[in-house]
Image (tube, rainbow, N blue to C red):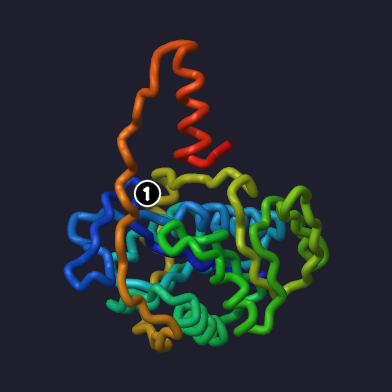
Amino acid sequence: MDIVVCIKRVPATDAAIKIAADGKSIETAGVSYELNAYDEFALEQALRIKEQLGAGSVTVVTLGPKEAQKELRDALARGADKAVLLVTDKWVYDTYSASATLANWLKSVPCTLVLCGRQAVDADNNQFAPALAARLGFGCVTEVSKLTLADATFTAERDIEGAREVVVCKAPAVLSCNKGLNEPRYANLKGIMAAKKKPYEEVAAQVIAPAMAIESLTLPPARAAGRIVGNGADAVPALITALRQEAKAL
């Protein structure tokens, strides 16, 4: 089975985000980047499927600047067989653009299964997997928290409001992976050394024009300072009044 894992290079979750001078993008100077956390579950699941079948290949691909090779080489060190970087200096913030660009590339390579993370922690929109599946004509299951494979048929479990849904999907398919699906492995010294000999390719990305335009970015308002309404039991009436009249929580 030829498995492709779509990963994304995102700002570290502890990075201090600032708005750039244009008011429409983030200031990248001094920002550290890392592999999107949800994509780690996708990569791990791809490696487990290959191990279960005892055959096949795992290719990791990302769309981004040349610096994204760091995350791709990390994926190679964890066990992926090949890495492809679709190189662009553009900030691809639009799902329409990203899914179209990746779909065009995927149509040119052997691919039975596409795995990706539930969502990227920067855009946080949870749209990429279904958009990509629609363009490829593949089946799609999102937010997978449990997955089994038998006879090229996937049985996936996903959490929905108040219940857990079980879905059966045949390959080819696009699956987005949720936290709890597995425990991602990390690169060891042997994997890091082996990764140096694995195929790594850079291709100039043919980025599709976005369907959405960012007009402005603003940071959320600063949180108001806390207020002490009293001490001990005597503060209860004042607290209840504040919750009712100010916070409208009661």
Is 76 above or below relative to 248?
Answer: below
In the rendered image, residue 164, in percent from the top left (x then y), is placed at: 77, 51
Q: Nearer the viewer, residue 70 or 217?
A: 217
Residue 201 visible in the displayed image: no
Q: Residue at x 58, y 77 (%)?
A: 132
How crowded is the residue under tag 1: few (<14 C-alpha within 10 Å), some, or many (20+)? some
Residue 159 visible in the displayed image: yes
Lateral position of residue 198 relative to residue 148, left or right: left
Lateral position of residue 55 relative to residue 43, left or right: right
**Circle 1 SS class:** loop
Q: Residue at x 22, y 63 (%)?
A: 27
In the rendered image, residue 23, in percent from the top left (x then y), is placed at: 24, 70
Task: Name the image quarter holding residue 57.
Answer: bottom right
Where does the C terminus fall, quadrant-wise?
top right
Q: Nearer the viewer, residue 90 or 163?
A: 163
Q: Residue at x 60, y 80 (%)?
A: 110
Lateral position of residue 192 relative to residue 133, left or right: left
Where does the N terminus fall, quadrant-wise?
bottom right
Residue holding disc 1: 13
Task: Count every numbered label the image shows and give the total.
Answer: 1
Task: Name the image quarter holding residue 177.
Answer: bottom right
Q: Nearer the viewer, residue 10 or 238?
A: 238
In the rendered image, residue 43, in percent from the top left (x then y), is placed at: 54, 57
Dot 1 amino acid type: Thr
Q: Residue at x 79, y 59 (%)?
A: 155
In the rendered image, residue 13, in percent from the top left (x then y), is placed at: 37, 49
